[in-house]
Image (cartoon, grey):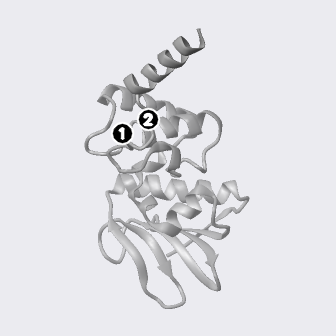
Amino acid sequence: MRILLCTLGLCCLVAFPAAGGVGTPDGVPPAIENICDGQTGSAFGLCNAYCEAMDCHLDEPQASATACSKVGTKFEQVTGTPPPCECPCVNFELFASVVSGASPVEACLVLDSGEVNIITIAGNEEVIAFSDVGVIVGAPICGDFDNVSGGFLDIAAITVEQHFTCADLLQQAAAAQGVECESIPF
């Protein structure tokens, strides 16, 4: 009997190999992605499904448009914002670190222009994760700004809708750490 069970078990392993190393179209298996780390409860599950398992934010998602729409809508009902992967700024190291809660937020500034700046400390340098509607450059931008050397670490063109998603994510990250965003004129 034991031999029969082992044989059946081996057959199952051969017939149904583990999918552990396969990954998803974005090249990162859901188990090691971290875009949803700042979410809790049902928001984490919905984010994980939308952003990591179904890759709804990509041009070729792993689910139907209907499924992506339903999960995205449910996430917005639970959190009040679109899923975090709808913000391209999360591709920047500091920005993603702030959104996930890994980087401590020292201050949050919301300018009248719609720009949101999150100030944190990286090593001994003050750095800013930001999303802006582009008062200076005329287009929405986002990224990480090194205040000490005065240079951009990264910027990317984004839509106005994505800017608002990114700005909301930064404000939520600050609130999650008990930092109130201060509105200042610009």
Inter-mark Cα distance, 2 to 1: 9 Å
Where is residue 103 shown, x and y percent of the image?
63, 66
What is the quadrant of residue 78 in the picture? Answer: top right
Residue 100 visible within the image: yes
Q: What's the mark number on residue 56?
A: 1
Residue 20's x, y, as percent? 45, 40
User: Residue 128 versus residue 48: which sits nearer the camera?
Assistant: 48
Q: Residue at image x 47%, y 73%?
A: 144
- Camera-side residue: 8 or 146? 8
Tag shown at residue 72: 2
Percent position of residue 39, x then y: 60, 45
Look at label 1 and name its amino acid.
Cys
Q: Is residue 112 visible?
A: no
Q: In this view, does 14 lie above or below 26?
A: above
Q: Is mark 1 on a helix, strand or loop?
A: loop
Q: Earlier in the sequence, mark 2 or mark 1?
A: 1
